[in-house]
Image (cartoon, helix red, strand yellow):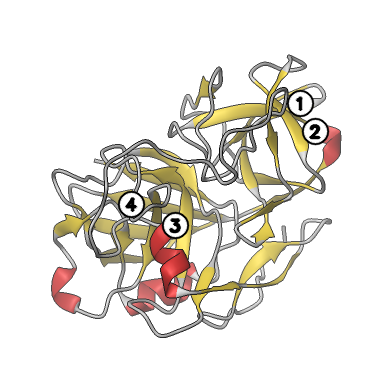
């Protein structure tokens, strides 16, 4: 991937990746406030704790589930936390996902996620196969996809969140671009720890609490759903600065405006590490 990424207009576009490892601008999916509230957790309102739903209900007999933020996958391996070097992969068409290299498919990884292209981090490679992080429950789900069926690029960025310090750091090629005090999950609805990634970028079609919502590939571990949606965790802004430095959300990470401006430039699939 090129070291120079196009400057993104907040709430308009974020960098994605080109097939040859360069970068291009990806138009953000415009979403209504109600749709965003259904998708992400920690954004205000009341929650309901009941079994999670998938994007299309129960799959038909013999049909594999899609590895999306709306799904809960079974018979899938968990992330070990090692092996990532910034390589990200984009399936140009829906691909079978296996629990082992060349094993029977347990899910499919769609080419698009939340209106934009699917980009997932590669955490392990074997001849002909890539192990990637998946955006589905349970958190840390991974699967193997055929390496000759994807486009690849490298993201020089890393996002780190320390929930105990209530701090977010953004690095590019190992160099710090900034550190900010943020709001994180409350004690009963903590921001989930582990390795995940920037899944999508959503621009509300009407004014709301944030001009840009950046869902990640992780979910609340204390709320099965939030407002009827899958309880996806996200980075987003917040109008009241008094929340920063506090543990008050339902799992999302609320960030200051200058942090959101820089996060808007981070390509999809970029690794995110959350520690506590």
Q: Nearer the viewer, mark 3 or mark 1?
A: 3
Q: Is residue 175 visible?
A: no
Tell me the residue at 39%/43% (across/down): 219
Q: Position of residue 239 (x, y in %)?
A: 25, 80
Q: Confirm or deny contact between disc 1 and disc 4 (CB under 8 A).
A: no
Neighbour tally class for label 4: few under 14, some 14-19, many 20 plus, Cα within 10 Å: many
Mark 2 or 1, nearer chain start: 1
Label 3, label 2: how far apart the Cα atoms are: 30 Å
| Marked residue nearer the N-terminal end (3 or 1) | 3
Pick whichever, 254 or 224, lies toward us. 224
Question: Which of the image's four quarters has the N terminus?
Answer: bottom right
Label 3–label 2 contact, CB within 8 A? no
Q: Which mark is residue 226?
A: 4
- Determine if residue 31 is in view: yes
Q: Which residue has dot 2 on it?
A: 147
Which disc is residue 129 wearing? 1
Q: Secondary structure at mark 4?
A: loop
Classify 271 as above or below 43: above
Q: Position of residue 86 (x, y in %)?
A: 60, 46
Residue at 63%, 32% (x, y): give it. Answer: 59
At 74% from the left and 15% from the top, the residue drawn is 104
Identify the mark at residue 39; answer none if there is no mark.
3
């Amino acid at each position: 991937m090129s070291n120079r990424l196009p400057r993104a207009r907040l709430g308009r576009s974020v960098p994605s990746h080109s097939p040859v490892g360069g970068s291009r601008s990806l138009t953000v999916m415009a979403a209504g406030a109600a749709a965003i509230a259904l998708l992400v957790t920690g954004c205000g309102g009341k929650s309901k704790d009941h079994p999670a739903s998938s994007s299309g209900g129960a799959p038909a007999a013999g049909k594999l589930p899609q590895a999306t933020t709306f799904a809960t996958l079974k018979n899938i391996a968990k992330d070990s936390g090692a092996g990532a070097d910034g390589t990200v992969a984009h399936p140009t068409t829906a691909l079978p996902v296996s629990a082992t290299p060349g094993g029977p498919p347990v899910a499919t990884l769609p080419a698009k996620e939340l209106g934009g292209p699917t980009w997932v981090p590669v955490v392990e490679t074997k001849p002909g196969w890539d192990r990637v992080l998946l955006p589905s429950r349970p958190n840390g789900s991974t699967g193997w996809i055929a390496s000759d069926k994807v486009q690849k690029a490298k993201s020089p960025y890393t996002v780190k969140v320390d929930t105990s310090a209530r701090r977010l750091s953004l690095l590019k090629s190992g160099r710090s671009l900034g550190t900010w005090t943020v709001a994180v999950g409350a004690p009963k609805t903590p921001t989930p720890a582990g390795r995940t990634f920037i899944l999508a970028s959503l621009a509300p079609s009407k004014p709301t609490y944030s001009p840009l919502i950046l869902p990640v590939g992780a979910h609340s571990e204390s709320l099965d759903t939030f407002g009827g949606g899958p309880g996806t965790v996200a980075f987003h802004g917040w109008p009241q600065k008094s929340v920063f430095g506090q543990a008050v959300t339902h799992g999302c990470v609320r960030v200051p405006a200058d942090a959101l401006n820089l996060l808007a430039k981070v390509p999809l699939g970029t690794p995110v590490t959350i520690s506590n």
